Amino acid sequence: ATTECEAAQECYTKAVSNYDTVKASSHQQLDALKQEWRALLRMECMIKVFELPEGDRANAIDQCQLKDVAKQSDQDLALQFPVKPGKPSCQIPTDPAGSSAYKTANYNSLPAEAPAKACVASCCEQSAGVSGLDFSGLGTTPSGSWSLALNIDTNDGNVVAYPNVEFWESATGLGGASDQTSERFSRDYKDTDVFSNKEAKELLIVCHNEGKALGWRTWKLLETKTLHGWFTTGNTCSSGLDTSKRYKMADETTGGDVGHLIEWEPLIKNTHNGVDDLYVNTEMNTNDFNRLSTNRNGGYNLGSGLGTQYDANFAGNCGDTERPQADAQMRTEKYHWGSGGGIGGLIGSDHNCHGGCPWTISSGYDYDYAIFVQ
């Protein structure tokens, strides 16, 4: 469970990060505007020269050239930013009520004949199955004994695009994700034990927003093996990306609830390409690779999937590219991943930006994805 103190500090950290990003971007834009303004000030000065008698123009031109337009542009275009408040100070309990440490300290001494009842309060630490996700907004809850392997928070500042090999391909690496149970639905998260050792027959993906379930879908896998095994089957960053190699995980969905997800959502709903097939480390078309996707022929530069590396031929496998390298991308309505109009492709805000990333357009949706196996 997250305490109010932890929530306040997390909120502060995100707000400061957004503040710093906006401030840096504003200064870059301001520098460009000042250059334009200085040019306009000189032009204005020169235009006024021609209003003078011809004999006075030479001296006026000299004065225009000597004019300190830089100082004037600084005065005319001055940005003022509010002062950042200090981080809230409070004490986070080391063993809060409901945690496993709290239960050990307070209840382990009870006699075997009179054990404590199971904790069912909202503060109780729960890590098994889909507990911790709120399905109250949906008509169904996935049944089964699910184990959480990965969570992709598309707006936490950590990028798990295709090139993040520590997250997708390493048996023990985290790739910037958390391995703390208390953060499993509020950050990128990886349970390396489940990821590397749990032999999976089925896969469940829950689309949520900071723990509030928005939709879910399950698939029967074509082979029984670990997620680590699936994500290292082929098209890895070390072996190279091959457009002729396609890796299908499933060809049958066994259940789901699309809730109110939009039609362009890539994995749970995907109205335009279907959801029966599930691919891993596979190119869709025109060198667009996803770590997970539900189709591989979605149309020219329309995106759709988790862990993206689009136009990989421009990047030397898992190198830098101006095309979308993101946590997640919508199946867009129009070409070039939404830059041609309609809904944008980027889900959340986490992506690698190179060369101004002109083809990475925000969809305006902050969907997160929890990936379970059983």
Image: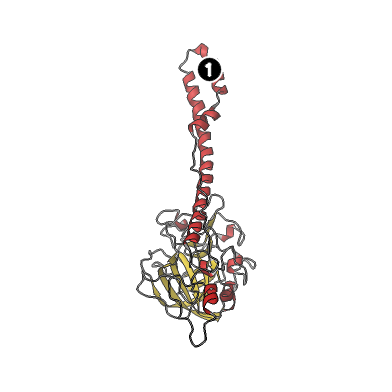
Residue occupying the far top of the picture? 55
Eyeballing the image, is 33 above or below 84?
A: above
Q: Which image quarter: residue 175?
A: bottom right
Q: Residue at x 51, y 34 (%)?
A: 36
The residue located at (49%, 60%) in the rendering is 5
Residue at the extreme bottom of the image, as rendered = 113
Q: Which amino acid does label 1 sit on?
A: Ala
156 vs 320, left or right, is left
Question: Residue beneath label 1, please?
Answer: 60
> Residue 250: x percent and y percent?
49, 77
Q: Is residue 221 above or below residue 209?
A: below
Q: With respect to residue 206, does 67 lie above or below?
A: above
Residue drawn at point x = 45 percent, y = 58 percent: 345
In percent of width and height, residue 107 lies at 51, 78
Q: Position of residue 298 (x, y in %)?
A: 45, 65
Q: Can residue 247 be seen in this view?
A: no
Where does the image place residue 148, in percent across and percent down from the top left? 51, 74
Q: In this rendering, does residue 159 appear at all?
A: yes
- Front residue of 317/162: it is 162
**Residue 174 lies in what quarter of the image?**
bottom right
